[in-house]
């Protein structure tokens, strides 16, 4: 089987060379600052949350010899004041908070900032270097604005290593990293994203420090050219993999992962909020958050209709859940739209589906309730299980269904569900991905040795008790409709549920198949066959090879494209793709 790519790269040619390493970067910046011929020059390095300010400051100070250095962490409000400021959004729940409306100015102390500005104004000669989150807010005028960016997956790794604090708070040694992540999700990243979107038109350079002590610098025009190039072609994000208490063994083999690891539970292969996009610009690799593309060019990426509904937000999520050789996922339910809006400040909820990529004999999916169960009795049983009094008898209350490769289970919000062991699931869902109310977790501990959070109270408020066996059979299990056939291909509608805004289409093909974005972003995964090639009928982009289990995005701006079996798939072997897009009129 053709090797899955864990580091997909977009090759970009540029007349402007990117820079690699602190020595080359500092030398270039020193020259660029010197040509301003000003007696006082102000250079601002604005940082996204998670960028190592110490690494940046040590290396730039040593090379640029600034007359005055301002580190913004010294200009924040007192920690006690910030904790009070964020408390309504952070809440006292271990997992859930409320989407903040705060901005970076809310964290900065106006008196300290005014004093810093006065010191800049009093300087007679030399370079002022301002570094940190909120740095762009400090000087009245700026001669050079550099933006230090960071993908969220790397931030999470640094968080687990005890290297990152939350915004304005010294808490990197917090033993429960789930609390740090929660504050990032609901507060820190929202604050930084708002500032980033404001600065994208103004920054002159982008600094990539994803690899510690191996920075890359590119001019803003080069980065924008690379992002614009991505809009004209299919591309894949950099997938990331994570273990879990129920994780399996399938991805180790198929994705070529480290076999010494106990398991891999998740692969996040199209979650632009957290995935990165990797460019090779004249041979130098620049890794950026995929969100930069969403923020910079949302209409071209998403299409007018999707952008008008969701704004600069990517609403489709693809990820893998591997339980082959593992265990059951937690029994869970997702909030209804009204509930997620009222309780958490989110505009839409996590409707989803399970597309079964592979399964062992006897694999099952839990979906919906058994006929005639008593809600009060079931909730009481869940409460007893949570207290440790008695294990929850899932088979008594929840319907299980046999699962085979290429089955598709639809899971509108409010429906109890979980993948059973021995399934390889492609989860296709809307993007609010942390809003899972676990009801029962089979008595397991998390990998951190702590009990995994259970949210029966939230679940009670959203479970749709009428979604029992007959409703699920009619509405959610293999609702597959043949839409058309041709020479060597067929197209089927497989979901999602009519309550959900995502549509999915499955194509089976041994010959070339014509697709068209029709003005809306497409997300696809090759779920059958070893290799296929995506091409433009108008030769608008170079052929793009996709391999088994790889996910790729086709921007709305691309328009028509074809997919054809190639490599070992081309000898009359069938390929299968599953495609998702936002339904028109929803």
Image (cartoon, rainbow, N blue to C red):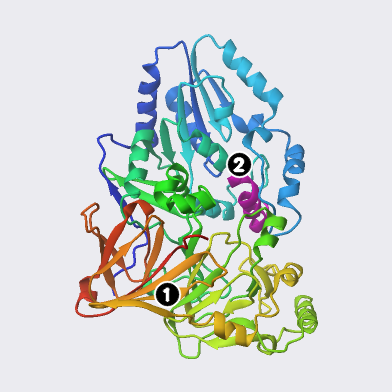
Side of 421 relative to 338 (left or right): left
Name the residue at the front extreme.
585
Secondary structure of the residue carrying numbered label 2? helix
Instruction: Judge whether residue 365 is colored magenta.
Output: no
- According to the picture, the residue beneath numbered tag 1 turns out to be 493
Locate residue 162, reporting x and y percent: 60, 51
Q: Residue at x 65, y 30 (%)?
A: 74
Image quadrant assignment for residue 358: bottom left
Question: Please, is residue 22 above or below residue 560 in the view?
Answer: above
Q: Which residue is mark 2?
A: 191
Whole-percent x, y for residue 103 in the image: 64, 38
Q: Write the residue at 46% across / 36% down.
A: 200
Structural crowding at the residue carrying mark 1, measured as other residues with C-alpha within 10 Å and reported as few (<14), some (14–19) or many (≥20): some
Residue 70 in the figure: left or right of residue 502: right
146 to the left or right of 226? right
Q: Main secondary structure of the magenta part?
A: helix
Judge from the rendering whether residue 426 lies leftward or rightward of residue 417; answer left or right: left
Which span of residues is magenta-colored?
174-191
Frontmost residue, 161 versus 269: 269
Which circle, 2 or 1, is nearer the viewer? 1
Secondary structure of residue under mark 1? strand
Which quadrant would residue 235 be assigned to in this image? bottom left
Residue 578 visible from this viewpoint: yes
* Quadrant of the drawing holding the N terminus: bottom left
Residue 38 coordinates in the image, percent (x, y) = 44, 12
Crowdedness near tag 2: few (<14), some (14–19) or many (≥20) residues, C-alpha within 10 Å: many
* Number of disc labels: 2
Image x and y of residue 18, in percent: 32, 37
Q: Is residue 343 above or below residue 448?
A: above
Q: Does the CB distance between marks 2 and 1 fall below 8 Å?
A: no
């Amino acid at each position: 089987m053709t090797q899955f790519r864990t580091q997909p790269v977009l090759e970009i040619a540029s007349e402007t060379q990117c820079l690699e390493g602190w020595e080359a970067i500092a030398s270039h910046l020193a020259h660029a600052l010197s040509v301003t011929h000003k007696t006082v020059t102000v250079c601002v390095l604005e940082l996204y949350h998670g960028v190592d300010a110490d690494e940046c400051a040590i290396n730039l100070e040593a090379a640029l010899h600034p007359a005055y250095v301002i580190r913004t962490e010294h200009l924040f409000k007192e920690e006690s004041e910030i904790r009070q400021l964020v408390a309504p959004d952070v809440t006292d729940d271990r997992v859930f908070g409320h989407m903040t409306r705060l901005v970076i100015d809310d964290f900065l102390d106006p008196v300290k900032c005014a004093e810093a500005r006065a010191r800049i104004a009093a300087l007679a000669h030399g370079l002022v270097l301002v570094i940190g989150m909120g740095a762009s807010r400090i000087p009245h005028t700026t001669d050079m604005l550099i933006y230090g960016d960071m993908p969220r997956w790397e931030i999470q790794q640094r968080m687990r290593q005890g290297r990152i604090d939350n915004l304005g708070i010294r808490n990197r040694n917090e033993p429960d990293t789930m609390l740090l992540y929660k504050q990032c999700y609901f507060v820190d990243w929202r604050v930084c994203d708002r500032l980033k979107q404001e600065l994208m038109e103004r920054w002159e350079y982008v600094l990539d420090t994803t690899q510690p002590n191996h920075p890359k610098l590119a001019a803003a025009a080069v980065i924008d050219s690379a992002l614009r190039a991505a809009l004209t072609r299919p591309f894949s994000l950099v997938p990331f993999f994570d273990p879990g208490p129920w994780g399996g063994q399938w991805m180790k083999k198929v994705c070529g992962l480290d076999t010494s690891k106990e398991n891999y539970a998740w692969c996040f292969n199209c979650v632009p909020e957290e995935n990165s996009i990797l460019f090779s610009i004249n041979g130098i690799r620049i890794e950026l958050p995929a969100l930069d593309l969403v923020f910079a060019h949302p209409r071209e990426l998403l299409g007018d209709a999707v952008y008008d509904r969701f704004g600069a937000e990517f609403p489709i999520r693809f990820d893998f859940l591997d339980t082959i050789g593992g265990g059951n996922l937690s029994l869970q339910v997702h909030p209804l739209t009204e509930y997620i809006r009222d309780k958490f400040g989110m505009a839409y909820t996590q409707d989803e589906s399970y597309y079964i990529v592979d399964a062992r004999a006897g694999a099952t999916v839990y979906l919906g309730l058994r006929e005639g169960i008593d809600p009060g009795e079931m909730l009481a049983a869940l409460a007893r299980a949570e207290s440790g009094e008695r294990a929850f008898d899932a088979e008594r209350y929840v319907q299980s269904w046999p699962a085979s490769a290429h089955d598709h289970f639809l899971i509108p919000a409010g429906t109890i569900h979980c993948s059973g062991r021995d399934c390889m699931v492609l989860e296709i869902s809307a993007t609010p991905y942390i809003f899972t109310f676990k009801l029962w977790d089979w008595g397991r501990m998390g990998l951190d040795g702590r009990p995994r959070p259970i949210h029966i109270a939230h679940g009670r408020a959203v479970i749709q008790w009428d979604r029992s066996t007959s409703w699920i059979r009619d509405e959610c299990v293999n609702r597959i409709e043949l839409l058309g056939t041709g020479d060597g291909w067929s197209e089927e509608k497989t979901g999602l549920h009519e309550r959900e805004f995502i549509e999915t289409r499955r194509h089976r093909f041994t010959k070339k198949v014509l697709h068209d974005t029709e003005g809306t972003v497409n997300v696809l995964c090759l779920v059958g066959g070893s290799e296929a090639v995506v091409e433009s009928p108008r030769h608008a982009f170079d052929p793009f090879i996709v391999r088994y289990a790889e996910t790729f995005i086709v921007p709305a701006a691309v328009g028509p494209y074809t997919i054809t079996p190639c490599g070992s798939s081309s000898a009359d072997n069938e390929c299968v793709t599953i495609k998702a897009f936002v339904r028109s009129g929803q």
